Image (spheres, rainbow, N blue to C red):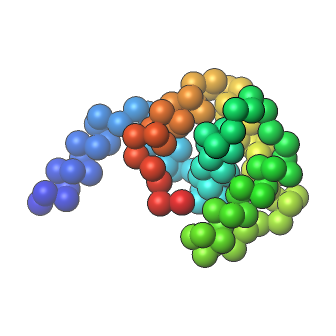
């Protein structure tokens, strides 16, 4: 069917990092969206965990997804940070993809 072809072609032509991001748990994807939103709407080159958490909570509210607590949020940020350190292109590619195709968050 057309849907099967669409899925197959999108898997072939999407960068591997995009597939990795799409395979992340929902809340980690939302943290990445919060990070992208934070830097997109300001000229800052850094942010605090508190500011990022506020942006994450706004995304959770807008999508009606219950936010995780601060400890779990902090752990998710550390996990994502480890991924970026292992693969520095991880966030760069995500940000480029995010600009082209805004996720539903």
Instruction: Give left or right: position of 28 versus 96.
Output: right
Up/down of 66 relative to 8, above or below:
below
The picture places residue 14, in percent across and down from the top left corner, at: 35, 36
The picture places residue 35, in percent across and down from the top left corner, at: 67, 44
Question: Looking at the image, which residue is at 45% across and 50% down?
Answer: 102
The picture places residue 15, in percent across and down from the top left corner, at: 40, 32
Q: How many marks can you see? A: 0
Instruction: Give left or right: position of 45 versus 61.
Output: right
Up/down of 5 relative to 78, above or below:
below
Q: Nearer the viewer, residue 77 or 56?
A: 56
Q: Quadrant of residue 59?
A: bottom right
Question: Looking at the image, which residue is at 73% across and 63% down?
Answer: 57
Up/down of 30 relative to 21, above or below:
below
The picture places residue 69, in percent across and down from the top left corner, at: 83, 66
Q: Nearer the viewer, residue 95 or 20?
A: 95
Q: Nearer the viewer, residue 39 or 92?
A: 39
- Quadrant of the image for the C terminus? bottom right
């Amino acid at each position: 069917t057309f849907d099967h072809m669409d899925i197959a072609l999108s898997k072939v032509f999407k960068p591997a990092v995009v597939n990795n991001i799409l395979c992340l748990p929902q809340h980690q994807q939302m943290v990445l969206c919060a990070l992208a939103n934070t830097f997109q709407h300001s000229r800052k080159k850094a942010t605090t965990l508190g500011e990022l958490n506020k942006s994450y909570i706004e995304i959770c509210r807008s999508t009606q997804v219950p936010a995780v607590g601060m400890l779990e949020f902090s752990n998710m940020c550390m996990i994502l940070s480890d991924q970026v350190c292992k693969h520095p292109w991880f966030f760069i590619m995500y940000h480029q993809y995010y600009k082209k195709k805004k996720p539903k968050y």
